[in-house]
Amino acid sequence: MTAPRGAPASDRGTPPFVVLMPLWGRDVPERVELAITSATLAQQLRPDLLLLTVDGPLPAGLEDLVARVLDGEFGPAEVLRHDAHRGVAAALQDGLEASPHELVARADADDICRPERFALQIPRMQGGAGAEKSPAAARASAALAPLDLLGGSMREFNDRIAPGEGPLRSRPLEHDQIVEYLPHHSPFHHPTVVMRRSVALAVGGYRVLPLLEDYWLWERMMLGGARMGNIDEVVVDYRVDEDLFARRGGWRLYSSDLFLQRRFVLDRVTTPFQFLRNLVLRGVYRFIPGQLRRIGYRKFIESSA
């Protein structure tokens, strides 16, 4: 019997997978519920498990939502809890280690996954076309190699711009293009990523590095031999509030840049010249006003993808 549309992956002939979503006390309950629904019940290919990692104490509204998750309202789910707020890297590492399945899809608690996201990405991880591809596209991609790390495109939205109508964020598609792009910018949009748990854990998984814990993981996965790709389709609507670019500046984040750029040159991912160039460019980016940072991101980072 054919499994119904919206059935878990394991009932649809595709590998089982987990959606890993961190949650903390400043998340907005209404946004979190929308994010969870979009990544579970609204998916054409539903996950086999939603894994929420609760980072620190939660207010009553979020506790009520977590109780509904545990009651199975959004499908099979588990919740990992920590009494103290430790940061997103520690929360994600706990989830990665606890996942019972090899394929782990990241999702954030304030974004919206498009309904076709996992129907496109999960088959591609195995080397095939997504479930929404045409028969011709499926035949053309039949010989594609399985991937260890796969992302996709996003569109921004906020309280004034509806999902699907905001600026596009894309990244290079093919493995060799990603390898070439990585020394300059992060080649993946973190909320769109599906990864192989074993490959990520083999290189240490998530490590604490404010704002750049994902970028560091991509570099180590690349050095560990991971096969990487992005799909061109928009798979996530990414919430961009008014303060997002303001939070992307300052000494704390420039310290993360300095650490990671030193790591890149020591790992021979970049040359000494690229190291100096990247530090200068990131210094300018971190210390200009937030509105100029927004303009610079659009003009120089997204236009280079």
Image (cartoon, rainbow, N blue to C red):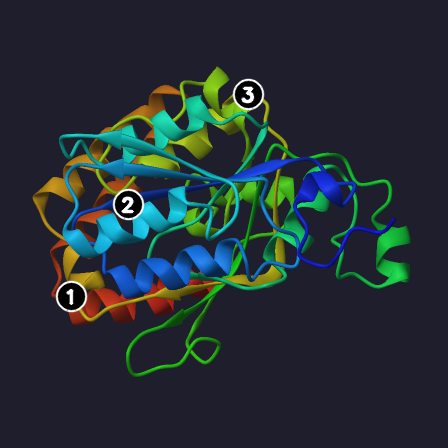
Q: Determine whether 77 is above or below 109 in the image.
A: above
Nearer to me, 199 or 13: 13
Rate crowding at label 3 as few (under 14), some (14 to 19) or many (20 or more) other CA atoms within 10 Å: some
Q: Nearer the viewer, mark 3 or mark 2?
A: 2
- Residue occupying image coordinates x 42% and y 77%: 166
For marks 3 and 2, give the CA distance. 23 Å
Does residue 157 appear left or right of residue 126 in this picture? left
Tell me the kind of residue under disc 3: Ser
Which SS class for mark 3? helix
Rate crowding at label 2 as few (under 14), some (14 to 19) or many (20 or more) other CA atoms within 10 Å: many
x, y percent for residue 15: 70, 35
- For marks 2 and 1, the one nearer the N-term is 2
Q: Residue at the bottom extreme? A: 160
Q: Nearer the viewer, mark 1 or mark 3?
A: 3
Please name the residue that numbered disc 1 is placed on: 290
x, y percent for residue 19: 49, 42
Residue 23 badge: 2
Does residue 78 appear left or right of residue 225 in this picture? left
Tell me the kind of residue under disc 1: Gly
Please name the residue that numbered disc 3 is placed on: 198
